[in-house]
Amino acid sequence: MSEAIQIRDVASTSVPLHQSVANIVADKIRKGEWAVGDTLPSEFALCAEYGVSRHTLRHALRTVEEMGLILRRQGAPTRVISQTQPRRFTQDLNSPADILRYGRNTYRINEVEEFVRCDEELERVLRAPIGSSWFHIGAVRREQNSNVIIAWTDMYVLPEFSELVHEPDHTHSLLYEQIERKYGVSIHRAEVDIYSTGVSPHIAKSLQVPKGTPCLVFVRRYYDTQGRLFEATITHHPEGRFVYTMEYRHA
């Protein structure tokens, strides 16, 4: 019996189709059919193998990624990073600022200000509907005294917040702080992804580093009280220019 038929048989029960595909992919990884470091077949090949649409496959791969078994990055093949689901730890924070707080002696210089629509590549990062509208700000962050570039950030906010770029304190305040002050929209929930990667050519130019330079990347998504994503940021820190420190205390 082919895997496509097996999936359809399982999907005829209460298990969603994307979850059936995710379960099979995860099982193959756990059994070593795809070893750590291997790349998965192309989306086209997987869709043909399992008899599903690209939308269903991507939903399935996102589920496997959330299990901690694979890594999906824009413009790169999907890679197996673990055969076992990692243990997860929860950190309690006093405020969203604790997630990633820069010193007040830093500022941004906007190089990009544009309206965009979420495409398939951006959807992987934003986890927002394809076709949804966003206002994109691309900026370098510098240290006030030394003027050293410490990061490049791509910021995506809902279009109704685009006028924030004209606020007097725009380049010195965090966007979510400005959104709360001006529009009364506050953070109810935040997600943070942290990973390392080599910097792309266009970001390398703004950071003034060679392309491929190792970077620590923070992806942050901020949701309001209605569960609506209203801001997402992707920040690249080139090696040697930023340290992220967390402190835990025994209660």
Image (cartoon, helix red, strand yellow):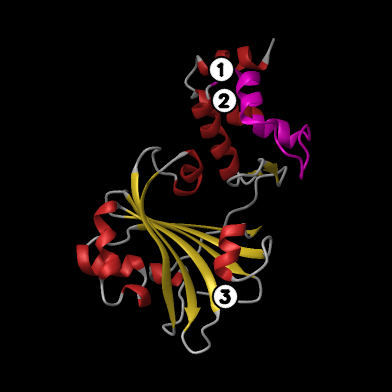
Q: Which mark is residue 245?
A: 3
- Secondary structure beneath disc 3? loop
Residue type, label 1: Val
Residue at label 1?
10
Identify whether 213 is placed above or below 169: above
In this rendering, the label closer to the viewer, 3 or 1: 3
Residue lying at the far top in this picture: please name it: 1
Q: Which residue is mark 2?
A: 20
| CB-based contact (under 8 Å), mark 2 and mark 1 | yes
What type is the residue that disc 2 sits on? Answer: Ser
Residue 85 coordinates in the image, percent (x, y): 65, 45
Residue 2 makes an appearance in the image = yes
Q: Is residue 165 magenta?
A: no
Q: Residues within 10 Å of mark 3 (few under 14, many from 20)?
A: few
Circle count: 3
Write down the region rendered in magenta.
Answer: 25-52
